[in-house]
Image (cartoon, helix red, strand yellow):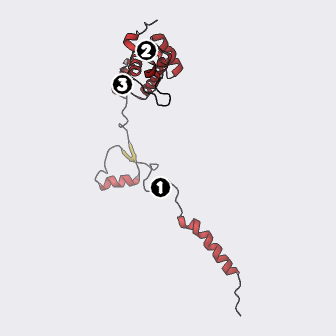
Amino acid sequence: MPSRLSSAALIVPLDRQGLLGCPTHGRVRTKTVKKASRVIIEKYYPRLTLDFHTNKRVVNEIAIIPTKPLRNKIAGFVTHLMKRIQRGPVRGISIKLQEEERERRDNFVPERSAIDLDTIEVDADTQAMLREMNFGSLPRVAVSAHAISASAPAYRERRPRNTHHNAAPAAAAAAPAAAAPTATA
């Protein structure tokens, strides 16, 4: 079992008023909570999860924390930082696994480049444009019938707005006038 962190190195006890504060105001994460959480994450990262209750038990095992509310605050901030670490690097926390993962991503070289293509398929319009620019004889450029053309829209044509709203009232107004006999005497 790993050694427990001493309270002198990790936690500075707070007085009751400083810990709980006014019940109607928002809570403030003190430097103590932040520092303790960062130290715990750096030393015990593999044991921590994204679940508050699991982290609360881990924090209780590895550190001597004088009060229960302070333990819960530290466990809550540890959980918050773990979620942030999942999204990307967090300032002030240096984790060996995090650094190794970043280094592996930076040094990654694919077996075959995505840019390295055997043939480049273009449509007829693009081929005509290349010929106009004196690039008609480029190697590995092939005209494809199924290439998407910019001139052919992929969306459905819209009808004019006024035909939908104005056509029905105009037709309804014209029908009674034509059907009604004119009375001339």
User: Can you identify the residue that label 1 sits on?
Assistant: 153
Q: Is there CB contact under 8 Å for labels 1 and 3?
A: no
Q: Helix, strand, or loop for circle 3?
A: helix
Q: How far from the left and from the top, in percent, is residue 120? A: 38, 43
Give the Cα separation between the discs numbered 1 and 3: 43 Å
Task: Give the quadrant of the C terminus.
Answer: bottom right
Q: How many residues crowd around disc 1 within 10 Å: few (fewer than 14), some, or many (20 or more)? A: few
- Of circles 2 and 1, the one toward us is 2
Kind of residue at badge 1: Pro
- Of circles 3 and 2, the one toward us is 2
Q: Helix, strand, or loop for circle 1?
A: loop
Kind of residue at badge 2: Tyr
User: Can you identify the residue that label 3 sits on?
Assistant: 102
Which of 72/140 is in front? 72
Q: Is there CB contact under 8 Å for labels 2 and 1?
A: no
Q: Helix, strand, or loop for circle 2?
A: helix
Is residue 161 shown left or right of residue 81?
right
Q: How far from the left and from the top, in percent, is residue 103? A: 34, 23
Give the Cα separation between the discs numbered 2 and 1: 57 Å
Q: Residue at x 38, y 41 (%)?
A: 119
User: Can you identify the residue that label 2 sits on?
Assistant: 44
Q: Earlier in the sequence, mark 1 or mark 3?
A: 3
Give the Cα separation between the discs numbered 3 and 2: 19 Å
